[in-house]
Image (cartoon, rainbow, N blue to C red):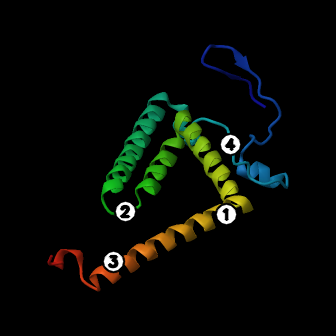
Amino acid sequence: MHAESDERGHVVVPTAERPVPGDVAGDMAEGGTADPERELGSRAPRFIKKSRTLHLSWQVGVFVVGLAVVIAGISMLVLPGPGWLVIFAGMAIWATEFVWAQLVLRWTRRKVSEAAQKALDPKVRRRNIILTTIGLVIIAVLVGIYLWKFGIVMPWKIDQ
């Protein structure tokens, strides 16, 4: 064990070496599973964290790359492409460095899990099936009325 000093000049004596909570290798070594709720903070390599200038430039680079991906995702909301998927990919890039992005992703993951659990509820599934069936019946009736009145003619070719 080595005594290290932090930025304020105090000597910090580390405790026994143990895995950090949320560390996949440590959790697997103990026979557990990887914790989805990892610690918040930067996931940059140690040699980058040691130099403040290098870490700041690393964060700027991560921010710029994440911003480019998020902007591409926003443009895909109106253009062809998987917009929301790309936006969340950009958020995941930001989450490697920024706590606010990690919190947003945790909140999103929690809401998606809640929605999935709700969708699997038998009452909700039954209601959704009934509403879908009613919607399809209404559409079929409207298509039948259209075909009965106009036959198989496109609306822009109707002469009256």
Residue holding disc 2: 81
Residue at the spot x=62%, y=67% of the render? 129
Residue holding disc 3: 146
Q: Find residue 155 and report its image quarter.
A: bottom left
What is the number of the mark on residue 38? 4
Vertical placement of residue 141 versus 97, above or below: below
Residue 121 in sight here: no
Check disc 4 and give the amino acid type. Answer: Arg
Query: Distance from label 3 to label 2 (Cα)?
Result: 34 Å
Residue 76 image position (x, y, % from top left) = 34, 56
Of residues 12 and 73, the one nearer the viewer is 73
N-terminal of the two: label 3 or label 1?
1
Check disc 2 and give the amino acid type. Answer: Gly
Labels 1, 2: front one: 1
Vertical placement of residue 116 versus 44, above or below: below
Q: Check the image and name the residue furthest to the top.
A: 9
Residue holding disc 1: 125
Query: Distance from label 1 to label 4 (Cα)?
Result: 33 Å
Query: Distance from label 1 to label 2 (Cα)?
Result: 29 Å
Residue at the spot x=80%, y=40% of the render? 18
Labels 1, 4: front one: 1
N-terminal of the two: label 1 or label 2?
2
For numbered disc 1, what is the local secondary structure? helix
For the C terminus, the image quarter is bottom left
Marks 1/2 in contact by CB < 8 Å: the verdict is no
